[in-house]
Amino acid sequence: MSQMKRWQPLIQKTETAPFTWLLVAQIAFIASSPLVVSNEAGQWIRITGLFAILLSGVYAAAVRRGFLVVALILLAPALFAWLGPDIFSDVIDEVLRLLSAAACLTFTCVVIITSLYRQEQVTQETITGGIDAYLLMGIIFMLFHQAIAITDPSAYTLHGLPMNEFAVPIDQLHGISTMLYFSFTTLTTLGYGDIAPASNIARLLTNTEAIIGQLYVAIFIARLVSLRVTQGVSGKQHSD
């Protein structure tokens, strides 16, 4: 029993590490994307940052063997789409890259939210995981917005004019800083109005992101309060 107690801090530290690494990868990607120059080297920096998030997500899913298997299955087509040869037209290949990455990150987000729901007390893991899930939502919707803009450059307008940057020959993650900015202003319902959805599917996706962003924050805070109250009642009963 004493040996088990000796290893307990190490076990807890190992369990929180996946969420921490994912948080670091996301912050680095979000902070660096607007600063990276749009050339070949810059594109590879963005791709490396995105893959750091994908791999950190797989690591986070390793908390359960079943989750890990699904995460690896979803990661395989994403690796092929990004690193393998082009098969279809430039537009289709780029959309497949974005959607395959979005599928991986969506599953990671589900894994994190499921893990948070199973938590019985507020810990560092709870807070880190909650932030991870929120940032993942912004990146996932960024990928969806990007895919729509590449398919239809007139789907979004900038200051009332079509966003011409998506009408040029497609490069990997071209215009990502623009859609990253738009996604998080939508997720937080900040909405400056400089970028606006023009097509029906773009409007639907934008409304969906805004609703999910608000509901998630409300539910997550309510969950934290509920766990904290439960902890307080439990602690009081033990002290009595």
Image (cartoon, grey):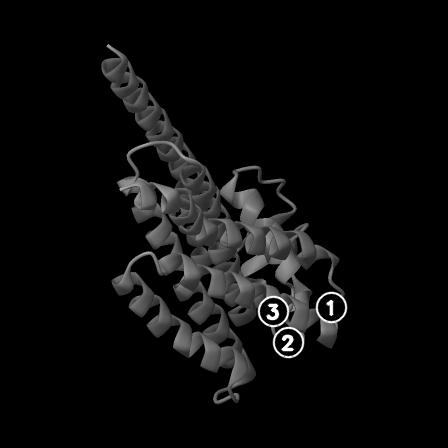
Q: Horizontal placement of 130 versus 38: left or right?
A: left
The crowding category of the residue bearing disc 3, from other C-alpha atoms within 10 Å (few below 14, some 14 to 19, many at least 20), is: few
Instruction: Looking at the picture, tell me which residue is in the foreground, 112 or 218.
Output: 112
Q: Residue at x 47, y 77 (%)?
A: 79
Figure check: 66 above or below 238: below
Mark 3 / mark 2, whichever is N-terminal: 3
- CA separation, marks 1 and 2? 9 Å
Instruction: Give the x, y percent position of residue 240.
Output: 23, 10
* Foreground of the two, 19 or 143: 19
Q: Residue furthest front?
A: 2
State the SS at label 3.
helix
Q: Secondary structure at mark 2?
A: loop
Distance Cα–Cα, label 1 vs label 3: 14 Å
Relative to 225, residue 9 above or below: below
Query: Is tag 1's residue or tag 2's residue first in the polypeptide sequence?
Result: 1
User: Decide: marks 1, 3 in contact (CB < 8 A)?
Assistant: no
How many marks do you count on the picture? Answer: 3
Provide residue 94's location: percent of width, then percent of height.
53, 76
Q: Give the spatial CA distance, label 3 vs label 2.
A: 15 Å
The residue where tag 2 is placed is 171
Q: CB under 8 Å between callouts 1 and 2? A: yes
Q: Which mark is residue 229?
A: none
Residue beneath disc 3 = 48
Residue at x 57%, y 52% (from the top left corner) = 24
Query: For residue 38, which numbered disc appears in the image?
Result: 1
Residue for point 40% across, 30% down: 221
Tag 3–tag 2 contact (CB < 8 Å): no
Identify residue type, mark 1.
Ser
